[in-house]
Amino acid sequence: MNDRVTVDIQDGVAVVRLVRADKMNALDNAMFAALVETGERLKSEAGLRAVVLSGEGRAFCAGLDMGNFQQMASGARRGGEGATGNLVTANRTAGGSNHAQHACMVWREIPVPVIGAIHGVALGGGFQLALGCDLRFVTAEVRLAVLEIKWGLVPDMAGMVLMRGLVRDDVARELTWTGRVFNGEEAVAMGLATRVCADPYAEALALAREIAAKNPHAIRAGKRLLNLMAEGDQHAILLEESREQTALIGSPNQVEAVTANLQKREPSFAD
């Protein structure tokens, strides 16, 4: 895994880095496997409070490895077989993802905030991977695209689920049907990026550390509610708000938050 993705955890913040820099961190079978393995590991990592996801070298992720497109150019039909298994009938996760989709969706399933630091390019599958993050910090000159139509394809790494709620329906259609490249400023304007930064990694790491200093149980409860907000109905969301808040009120970390504020000192939270 370490030749595709590395993980460094300090003070509750996991820095996850795609390290296939010679290929602009393109997605091959080994990269898919490493992303899934890393995400699954972090789901149960003790003491984890925030994650920063970034790419080494010139780019965040250039998308699907060129070798996969060259195989498609032979004209041989895959019969539903993808680079990571049968796209339709392969074993799917409890959330409904196949292996390639899970490489993006797993970041939403990690119980703490995941901040993407996006530079260079994030194209096609790389863009869908970025969408899997809770927040996306980008450079002004980054190049982004729903690029699958260039290769005669549609987004199939959870892009339709992850774009839902971020952009207007007509904008998603335009990007999907044209594959046009857009920059960081336009991504923020459309709702596909959180903020433009001179140094996305530095700002993502700073925010991750800030989040790590908050009540970790409240942060995790917030992520559960925010995930539900995208798909739950009004009654379900209202009920879960009450359940999460009831569990937090009077808990040791919540008492510590109140006490620290009253005493005008930094809080000390337990995991």
Image (cartoon, helix red, strand yellow):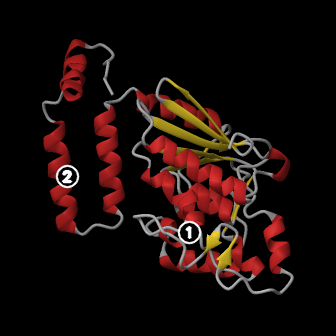
Q: Quarter of the image for the C terminus: give it.
A: top left
Can you tell which quarter of the image residue 80 is in? bottom right
Q: Is residue 170 left or right of residue 217?
A: right
Vertical comparison of 256 with 53: above or below? above
- Amino acid type of the residue tagged 1 in the rendering: Gly
For residue 63, side relative to residue 189 (left or right): right
- Which of the labelled discs sits on residue 241, or is there none? 2
**Residue 267 picture quarter:** top left
The quadrant of the rendering that contains the N terminus is: top right
Residue depicted at x 72% and y 53%: 142
Q: CA distance from mark 1 to mark 2?
A: 27 Å
What residue lies at 80% left-to-right and 79% top-to-bottom? 72
Across and down, in percent, residue 204 comes to 56, 37
| Observer able to see residue 143 | no
Q: Residue at x 50, y 59 (%)?
A: 105
Q: Crowding near pointer 1: few (<14 within 10 Å), some, many (20+)?
A: many
Does residue 259 sit above or below 43 in this rendering?
A: above
Q: Secondary structure at mark 2?
A: helix
Where is residue 130 shown, x and y percent of the image? 60, 55
Q: Is residue 158 left or right of residue 121?
A: left
Compare marks 1 and 2 and give the one earlier in the sequence.
1
| Residue type pointed to by label 2 | Glu
- Residue under circle 1? 159
Q: Which mark is residue 41?
A: none
What residue is drawn where x is 74% and y is 52%?
Answer: 141
27 lies left or right of 228: right
- Disc 2 crowd rating (10 Å Cα; few below 14, some 14-19, many 20+) is some
